[in-house]
Amino acid sequence: MDIAQELGIPVFCFSTFSARFLFLFFSIPKLLEDGQIPYPVGNSNQLLRGIPGGEGLLRCKDLPGIWSVEDVAKQDPMNLVNQILATSKSCGVILNTFDKLEGEFVTNLSKIYNKVYTIGPIHSLLKNSAQSQFEFWKEDHSCLAWFDSQAPRSVVFVSFGSLVKRTSSQLKELWNGLVNGGKAFVLVLSSDVLIEEAGEDYELVIREIMDRKEKGRWVIVNWAPQEEVLSHEAIGGFLTHSGWNSTMESLAAGVPMICWPQIGDQPSNATWFTKVWKIGVQMEDSFDRSTVETMVRSIMEHQDQKMENVIAELAKLANDSVGEDGSSYRNLQCLIEDIKKIEVN
């Protein structure tokens, strides 16, 4: 931001976070002043006070960065926070969300930024605005044909994005929980999914998994076309790391989530999904096969009609927002016009 200002170059910022999580960055100076952070080691579930819209919900572990006394002594999380705070000097911030989903936090951000452009869900807006084909990772579309042979809402989609990794013991517990859950599933298992551990052989771990019987009940792919998968009628649940892009894609498709958050904004997203919107469940303190099995059954047996109704309504609001009369569509047009008006010396 400083360099852009020095050179007289206008800046528009794109935040990959939710409006809620972006707003949390601006709450950190006050939390430090109040002495709520850094927090004693082991108190990550301690509730935070004084965050508009987050009272009784947000915990220390939901904040950007790791704020335990021990971790702060090793690495100062304010480096990232200060970078984000500096974006308030920009012409505006672009967000992958929509007004009716995060209205309170969008309003809070509008008091900080010159303009806030909510244009999400971006993947849905793209479908309505342009025809394009692009991939960052080579996608395996073979699973789509398999879905066609499955009953509606009978398959669990399991994917943890491109950054989150697992230990071999976590992967084994996940696998056994999925198998014991008795539901059909597709598992995204990239070649670099495992955290390197001494004495562990990736190929051996995968072979152990593949040796299980009932192979017709699941499919394993290296990378899946996630948007297409989530929108397929066979999908009944999404076991995810709770990254914001995946959250928005699942929400727009009307698919409930089993949240297994790990890093960054994922714990905060999972908190909101399960405790505020109440359209999913979260694996928080236990990651064993029994927990995985219980969570899979709780989502896939579709017994919570209230949850089903809420996610259907949110999916409708998400898709309405990107229509020609929707707020996200109009905000994109506004962003384009605002950029056109800029005169660069």
Image: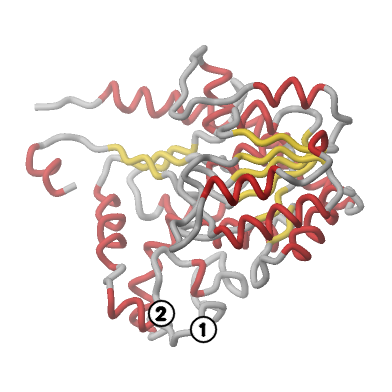
Residue in front for this viewpoint, 154 or 5: 154
Q: Position of residue 272 (x, y in %)?
A: 63, 59
Q: Position of residue 82 (x, y in %)?
A: 26, 61
Q: Position of residue 93 (x, y in %)?
A: 37, 42
The label on residue 43 is: 1
Residue in front for this viewpoint, 310 or 139: 139
239 over 223 or under it: above or below:
below
Residue 143 in the figure: left or right of residue 45: right
Kind of residue sitting beneath label 2: Ser
* Secondary element at image label 2: loop
Residue 234 in the figure: left or right of residue 207: right
Q: Position of residue 310 (x, y in %)?
A: 79, 47
261 over 89 or under it: above or below:
below
* Secondary element at image label 1: loop
The label on residue 68 is: 2
Mark 1 and mark 2: Cα distance apart in space: 8 Å
